[in-house]
C-alpha cells in the first residue's frame, strides 16, 4: 500500500476520533470550583457560594434538565446566577431554558442577565415573562443588595449592549454609560453579572470587585499550552476564554458555558457549571 494511502487512513482516523470526542464533550458536564478572596468580603459572607450557569443555548442535559440541576444542587449554592444566552437565535424554543429554571429555583434564589442571543431573539419577551413567573430575578441594569445578619454585598446585572446597538465599536461606551447609573458607590463588595468578558476593563473602572461572564465558550477548541482557539468578539487566541482572571485588584470569572451555537463541537473544553466561593482575604 502506498504511503499516501496510509497517511489518508491515519488522518481519517484522527478526524473521526476528534469528531467522536467532540460529540462526547458536548454532554460531558463537569463542575469547576473557583475561590475568590477579598478584604471587602464581609465576615458573614465567608464561604458564600455562587453557582454560575452560562450559555445554555437551548441545550439539554438529561431528561428534563435533571442532570444539569443535580450538578448544580450538589454544590449547595447560596445563589444561582445565569450570565446570558439561555436560548439560541439559531434554534428556536424556550423549553430547555424554562425546564432548567423551574428546577433551579427549588435549589436556591436565581438571578439572570440576558446575552446577545436574547437580544437578537423574538422569543426573549415571552422567555422573560415566563422566567419571572417561575421566580427568577432578572437584573437588567439593576443592583440587588444581598444581606446576611446585618452585613451585605451587592449583586448587579448589566444588560447586554446588543440590546441597544449593533455597532460593536460602541459596546464598551454603551456598557460604561449603563454601569454608571446603577453600580454602588458605598464601597460594598460588588458582584457584576455581565455576558461579555472582553469588557473586563470597563467593569473594573465601574467598580465591580468580581465580574461573572460567559460568551467566550471556552475558546471552543482548547489547545494544550495555548488555551482557547477562538471566541466571539475576541477573535483568535482570546485573552479571556475561561477561568479566573485578576487585574488591578479586581476579579473576573469566565464560564466555558454549556451549549454551542454556530460551532457544534467542543474539544478539550467540557461544558461546565462554575461554583464560585467567596472568602474574606487579608
Image: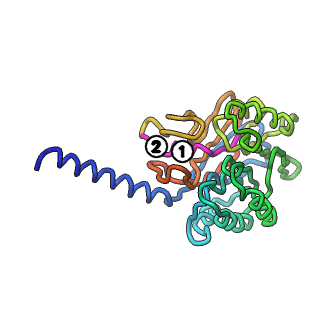
- What span is colored magenta in the figure? 211-223
Residue behind mark 1? 218
Within 10 Å of the Cα at label 2, are there few (<14), some (14-19), or many (20+) other Cα atoms? some
Q: Name the residue rendered at 77%, 64% in the picture.
A: 130
Looking at this rendering, what residue extends furthest in the left direction?
1
Between residues 39 and 211, which one lies in front from this camera angle? 211
Q: Position of residue 159 (x, y in %)?
A: 76, 44
Magenta stretch containing residue 102, yes or no? no
Q: Position of residue 212 (x, y in %)?
A: 68, 44
Whether residue 65 appears in this view of the structure is yes
Q: Position of residue 209 (x, y in %)?
A: 74, 37
Magenta stretch containing residue 216, yes or no? yes
Looking at this rendering, what residue extends furthest in the bottom direction?
63
Query: Would you place residue 89 above or below residue 131 in this image?
Result: above
Q: Classify residue 165 by image quadrant.
A: top right
Residue behind mark 2? 222
Q: For mark 2, give the secondary structure.
A: strand
Q: Classify residue 232 by image quadrant.
A: top right
Between residues 203 and 189, which one lies in front from this camera angle? 203
Spatial distance from mark 2 to mark 1, Cα to Cα? Answer: 7 Å
Q: Classify residue 204 by image quadrant.
A: top right
In the rendered structure, are the residues bearing label 2 and label 1 in contact, judged by CB atoms less than 8 Å apart? yes
Q: Is residue 236 left or right of residue 52?
A: left
Q: Position of residue 231 (x, y in %)?
A: 55, 40
Q: Name the residue rendered at 66%, 52% in the picture.
A: 85
Q: Name the residue rendered at 80%, 36% in the picture.
A: 179
Within 10 Å of the Cα at label 1, are there few (<14), some (14-19), or many (20+) other Cα atoms? many
Whether residue 50 appears in this view of the structure is no
Location of the C terminus by quadrant is top right
Amino acid at each position: 500500500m502506498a504511503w499516501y494511502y496510509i497517511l489518508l487512513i491515519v488522518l481519517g482516523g484522527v478526524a473521526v476520533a476528534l469528531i467522536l470526542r467532540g460529540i462526547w464533550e458536548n454532554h460531558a458536564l463537569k463542575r469547576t470550583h473557583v475561590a475568590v478572596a477579598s478584604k471587602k468580603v464581609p465576615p458573614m459572607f465567608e464561604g458564600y457560594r455562587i453557582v454560575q450557569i452560562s450559555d445554555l443555548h437551548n441545550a439539554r442535559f438529561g431528561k428534563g434538565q435533571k442532570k444539569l440541576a443535580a450538578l448544580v444542587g450538589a454544590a449547595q449554592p447560596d445563589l444561582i446566577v445565569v450570565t446570558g444566552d439561555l436560548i439560541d437565535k439559531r434554534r428556536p424554543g424556550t423549553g430547555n431554558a424554562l425546564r432548567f429554571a423551574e428546577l433551579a429555583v427549588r435549589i436556591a434564589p436565581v438571578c439572570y442577565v440576558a446575552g446577545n442571543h436574547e437580544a437578537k431573539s423574538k422569543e426573549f419577551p415571552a422567555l422573560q415573562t415566563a422566567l419571572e413567573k417561575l421566580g427568577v430575578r432578572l437584573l437588567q441594569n439593576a443592583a440587588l443588595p444581598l444581606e446576611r445578619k446585618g452585613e451585605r454585598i451587592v449583586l448587579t446585572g448589566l444588560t447586554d449592549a446588543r440590546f441597544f446597538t449593533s455597532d460593536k465599536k460602541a459596546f464598551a461606551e454603551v456598557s460604561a454609560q449603563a454601569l454608571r447609573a446603577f453600580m454602588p458607590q458605598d464601597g460594598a463588595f460588588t458582584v457584576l453579572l455581565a455576558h461579555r468578558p472582553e469588557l473586563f476593563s470597563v467593569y473594573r473602572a465601574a467598580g465591580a470587585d468580581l465580574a461573572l461572564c460567559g460568551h467566550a465558550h471556552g475558546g471552543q477548541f482548547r489547545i494544550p499550552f495555548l488555551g482557547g482557539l477562538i471566541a466571539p468578539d475576541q477573535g483568535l487566541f482570546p485573552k479571556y476564554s475561561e477561568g479566573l482572571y485578576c487585574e488591578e485588584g479586581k476579579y473576573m470569572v469566565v464560564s466555558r458555558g454549556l451549549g454551542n451555537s454556530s460551532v457544534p463541537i467542543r474539544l478539550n473544553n467540557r461544558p461546565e457549571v462554575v461554583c464560585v466561593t467567596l472568602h474574606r482575604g487579608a
